[in-house]
Every structure is written in structure tokens, then in C-alpha cells.
Image (cartoon, helix red, strand yellow):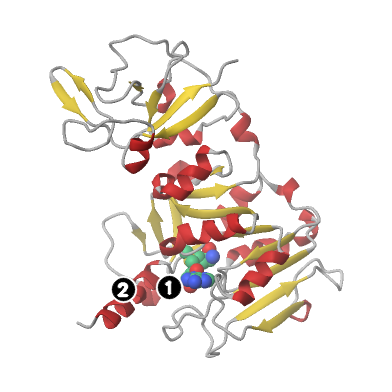
Amino acid sequence: MPKARNKQLGDAKKAKKDEFYTQLCDIERELRHYEHHFRGKTVLCNCDDPRVSNFFHYFSYKFEDLGLKRLVTTCYKNQERDLFSQNNSERAIWLEYLGDKNGNRVPDPEEIGIRYFNGDGDFRSDECIELLKQADIIVTNPPFSLFIEYIRQLVRYDKKFLVIGPQNAIHYKDTFELIKANRMWLGYGFTDGNAFFAIPKENMREFANGVYDPDKGLVKFRNCTWFTNLDHEKRHEEYVFIRKYRPDDYPKYTNFDAIDVGKSADIPEDWGGLMGVPDTFLEKYNPDQFEIVGLGSGDLAKQIGVKKNYRGRTDVAYRIDGKDKCPYSRIIIRRRAK
Ligand SMILES: C[S@@+](CC[C@H](N)C(=O)[O-])C[C@H]1O[C@@H](n2cnc3c(N)ncnc32)[C@H](O)[C@@H]1O
């Protein structure tokens, strides 16, 4: 198959995978922790068809409660015919809402300004970037296939944001560096780590048992979370130590000077050196108590001096009961001095 055609098919497949919609209850559950950040602010939802986006719904109905200045929502007109937009317009639109005018505290159609883009509403287009520049806080669930590019753009324009993304992004170089530098962190997340999203009927496919709920029309994702640079209370909650260091409980790595902590609840109170902890640590991460030093696997591990392990890879490893082990994914941290 010619390369260009291959790429087109690949892009179409990605576009399909990107098409799922956030539930209003999940938006409400996360957003209640940040309400004070929104007073007098312009909010942009830039991957949101206002006809289906619960982000637009949330912010337009909460406009007065939050004290917003302006709400802008942009809709991407996918190149694949009507995959996203449900009308027949070939042009992408954007909406502007400046609050309730007739006193009924409801966003009526005549209060919402509909504007047309010249292009397709891609968040990377000049037209969308112009709206991005005018915004204070960006809140959405962007396409996961473009997540890194999406975050890079927010950072380039120095924007505040609260967005849903794939949990794996923790390990990507750019995003990890932001987390390490305390320029981005995790939000509160989804109940029990499970997010349920609606998917359009056209995108229905076979799902493993328990993944799709036909009654509610929702698909379960275990691999996504909220990323933000808006401060919230949880990241200032003290980590409560319940364990002390005992050499038998915390193996030392064979290829890096640190101990392995198998569960993020088990960080030993009296260990002053480096430790490798699972990704779940980031849910409890209080930057006043801990410092993130690096990643325990891949290219980033090389940077902090992790040597090749028994498999010939730069992933932290330890030896226990005469067997070599390589734990799945570790973040290297240390306690901050009091
Ligand atoms: C995961 S969905 C979420 C939709 C909506 N934000 C929500 O949470 O319900 C991501 C959306 O981004 C749109 N999208 C894909 N590529 C885009 C691009 N380059 N620019 C803007 N939006 C895009 C997709 O059409 C898709 O609807």
C-alpha cells in the first residue's frame, strides 16, 4: 500500500480512537476542587463540539457561580465526513458565551454567539491559537493521540490548564520533565481510577467483558487521569508514613543506588536516600515533602545514572531470593529535608 494511503488510514484509526466524550458527573467531580481559580477568567475548551461537549455544558451553566468572564468553545471539523460534527457544515465553528443576559441563569441559544472558522478548528491552527492566547484557563479532554503535542502547546503559551490525558503520559519525556519540575501535576482523578466515557455509535467495536456497558452506552478506561497546573488542596496534604526502613523489606537496586518501594503507601519514614516508587505515588505527591529525581526506566533513567540491568536495559532491577527482578515502572524520589 502506498505510504500516503497508509498514513491516511492510520490517522483515521487514531481519529476514531480519539472520539469519546466525558461525562458531566466526572467534570463536576473534578472541577469542584478548583472553583476559586475561575473568577474573572476566560475559559477555553478547544477540543469540544458544543453540541455534545459536557465541558461546554458545565461552564455555561456554572458561568455565574464561577464568576467567569468569557467562555469559548471550539469544535474540530474532522476530515472524515461527519465523524465528529453531527451537522452537515464543512466548516468548523466556535462558540462564545458571555453569561446570562435575560436573568434566567440558563445559557439560551440567543445568548450564545456562533462563529465560523476558515479552517477545520484544529487546536494547532492559527485561528485556534489566537483564541488560546486570549484564554486564561484551558479545560478539556483532548485527543489522546496528540496529547504530548497538546500539552507542549499549552506550555509554550504559558497557559493554566486542567485536562484529561492518558496515564502513560507520566513516562513521556516532555510530560515527565514538567511533573518533575512541578510545572504540572495530577488532579484528583476518576473514582477508583475508572473513567467511563460515551462513544458514538459509529465507533462501536468489540470490547472485552466488562468494558462496555450497553445500558448506559459507556466504555470503561482504566488508563486516564486529570493533568493540571492549577494548585489544589490534595497536593498539600501531608503524606502519612506507616513504615520504617528494614533492609529485608526494601531491596536495593543492583544497577542504581536506591531502594525499591513496592507500594506507594510503604515509603519508609526514616530512609533519607533515593527510592523507586510506583506511578501511584503521584496521586499522593506533596512537593513540600518529596522531590522527584527522575524515572527508573528508559532513556530518562540513563540521565540519572541507572546502569544496564541483567536484561541489558536501563531499568532499575534488584535481586531477591537468588532471582533478578525488574519492577514495572518506577519513579525515583527522595524526601526533602525538613
Ligand atoms: C477524547 S475526545 C473528547 C471530546 C470532548 N472534549 C469531551 O471530553 O467530551 C477528543 C476530541 O478532540 C477532537 N480532536 C481530534 N483532533 C483534534 C485537533 N487536531 N484539534 C482539535 N480537536 C481535535 C476529536 O474530534 C474529539 O472529539
Three-letter code, disc 1? Pro
Q: Nearer the viewer, residue 135 or 106?
A: 135
Regarding residue 186, the answer to whether it shows in the image is no
Q: x, y (%) of residue 282?
A: 48, 36
130 displayed left or right of 302: right
Q: x, y (%) of residue 313?
A: 22, 38
129 displayed left or right of 274: right
In the image, is residue 178 above or below residue 322? below
Q: Earlier in the sequence, mark 1 or mark 2?
A: 2
Regarding residue 56, the answer to whether it shows in the image is yes
Tell me if the residue at label 1 has its CB under 8 Å from ligand 1. Answer: no
Q: Nearer the viewer, residue 107 or 297?
A: 297
Residue at left 35%, top 21%? 258
Residue furthest to the left: 322
Mark linked to residue 200: 1
Mark linked to residue 270: none
Question: CA separation, marks 1 and 2?
Answer: 19 Å
Q: x, y (%) of residue 1?
A: 19, 82
Q: Secondary structure at mark 2?
A: helix
In the image, is residue 29 above or below residue 238? below
Q: Nearer the viewer, residue 76 or 66?
A: 76
Which circle, 1 or 2, is nearer the viewer?
A: 2
Q: x, y (%) of residue 4?
A: 30, 81
Number of other residues with Cα within 10 Å of mark 1, as a class: few under 14, some 14 to 19, many 20 or more: some
Mark linked to residue 10: 2
Classify the position of the C terminus by image quarter.
top right
